[in-house]
Amino acid sequence: MLIASLKPRTMGGTTNTGLLAYALARAGHPVTCYDADESLQLATWRAEVDDFPCEVHEADTPAFAETVYPTMDHSRINLVDTGHAENHPDIVDSVLEVADLVIVTASPTEPDYKRLTKPKRGTTLAKLIKRSTVLRPDGKPPTTVVLLNRCNPSPNAKRPKTYGDLLRNGGADGTEPRWDVLTTRIPRVEEIASAVGFPCNKRERKAPFDALVTELTHRGYIPETSPAAVIPSSR
Ligand SMILES: Nc1ncnc2c1ncn2[C@@H]1O[C@H](COP(=O)(O)OP(=O)(O)OP(=O)(O)O)[C@@H](O)[C@H]1O
Ligand SMILES: [Mg+2]
C-alpha cells in the first residue's frame, strides 16, 4: 500500500512522515519511504542517522504514478513525503493518482488553517484531492485524514479542538470541504521539533506516533501485524 503525507506548505510534514516510518517499523510493518519533495529532507535524514528504519528513495517527480509507483513492493507500507502542494501541485497530483491513504498534516493555528482552506495563491488541497478522482482507477478520492500537529499538549488546550471542529464541520458556516480529523494529535514539543536529522531515541518522538499507528490500524487503514513480526525498537 501507499500512504501519502501531504501539506499545503511547511507544517511539520517531514517530521511526521519520518516519525511515522519509525513507528510503523516498531509495530512490525515492512516500510519503505519515498521523498517526493525536491528539498529531499527525508532522504537526508535517513543518510544522517544510523537508526532510520528503512530505505528512502528520491521520488520528486511529476511522473510519480508512472515511474515510481510501479517499482514499489506493494506488500510493504510505502510512505511518501511530498513538498508544498501550493508550489508543486504537479507532483502532488501524481501522488494522489495512486495513494491508498492520505495524511494531511495541519497545525491548529489561524494562518495554517487559512493556508489549508483558503490559500491566497495555489489550488486548495481539497480541490487537488477531488480532481484526483478523474485519474484514479476506481474514480474515487483516496481515503484522507487530517493529522493535527504542533498542538498545545495541555488537555485543556482550546485551539486543537476549535480548529479540529472547523475542519470537521466545513468551516464556521459549513460551506467548506469537510475533513476527517484524526483523534491522535501530535504535541508541540521540543523533542519533536528537533527530530528531523536525528535518531528516534526519545520517548516523546515515539509515543504520539505509536498512537497514530494504533488509530490507523483500528480504523482499518493499515493491516494488523502479528506479534512475531514486531522488531526491536533499538534499531
Ligand atoms: N510536533 C512539533 N512540535 C514542535 N515543532 C514542530 C513539530 N513538528 C514540526 N515542528 C517544527 O516545524 C517546522 C517544520 O517542520 P518540517 O520540516 O517537518 O515541516 P515540513 O512541512 O516538512 O516543511 P518543508 O516545507 O520544509 O517541507 C520545523 O521547524 C520543526 O522543528
Ligand atoms: Mg519537509
Image: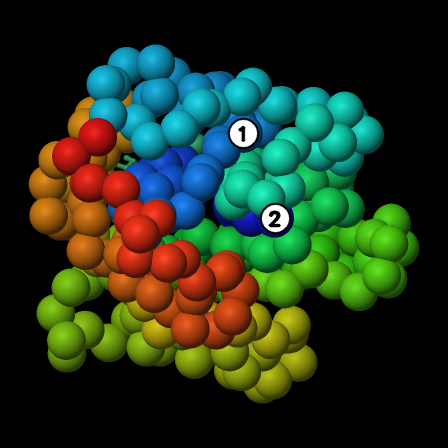
**Mark 1 crowdedness (10 Å alpha carbons): few <14, some 14-19, many ≥20:** many
Say if 131 sits above or below 38 in the image.
below
Q: Residue at x 65, y 72 (%)?
A: 177
**Residue 21, x across and y down, in percent:** 38, 41
Measuring 29% from the left and 71% from the top, which residue is drawn there?
159
Q: Nearer the viewer, mark 2 or mark 1?
A: 2
Give the SS element for disc 2.
loop
Quadrant hosting residue 129: bottom right
| Residue under the point 50% across and 60% down | 222
Q: Give the amino acid type for the residue marked by disc 1 in the picture.
A: Tyr
- The picture quadrant where one finds residue 71 is top right
Q: Quadrant of ligand 2?
A: top left
Vertical order, 185 against 177 (above or below): above
Please name the residue shown 24% across and 76% down the image. Answer: 158
Q: Nearer the viewer, residue 163 or 208?
A: 208
Point out residue 173 in the picture as x, y percentages from the top left corner.
58, 85
Ligand 2 within 8 A of label 1's CB?
Answer: no
Mark 1 — residue?
34
- Residue 133, percent from left and from top: 83, 58
Closer to the camera in the image, 222 or 99: 222
Q: Secondary structure at mark 1?
A: strand
Q: Is residue 78 left or right of residue 143?
A: left
Task: Work out whether residue 102 or residue 169 is closer to the camera in this orientation and state it.
Answer: 102
Q: Amino acid at mark 2?
A: Met
Q: Is residue 200 above or below residue 169?
A: above
Instruction: Report the residue marked by disc 2.
Output: 1
In the image, 187: left or right of 31? left
C-alpha span from label 2 to label 1: 13 Å
Identify the disc placed on residue 22.
none
Task: Give the mark nearer the N terminus: 2 vs 1.
Answer: 2
Residue 116 visible in the displayed image:
yes
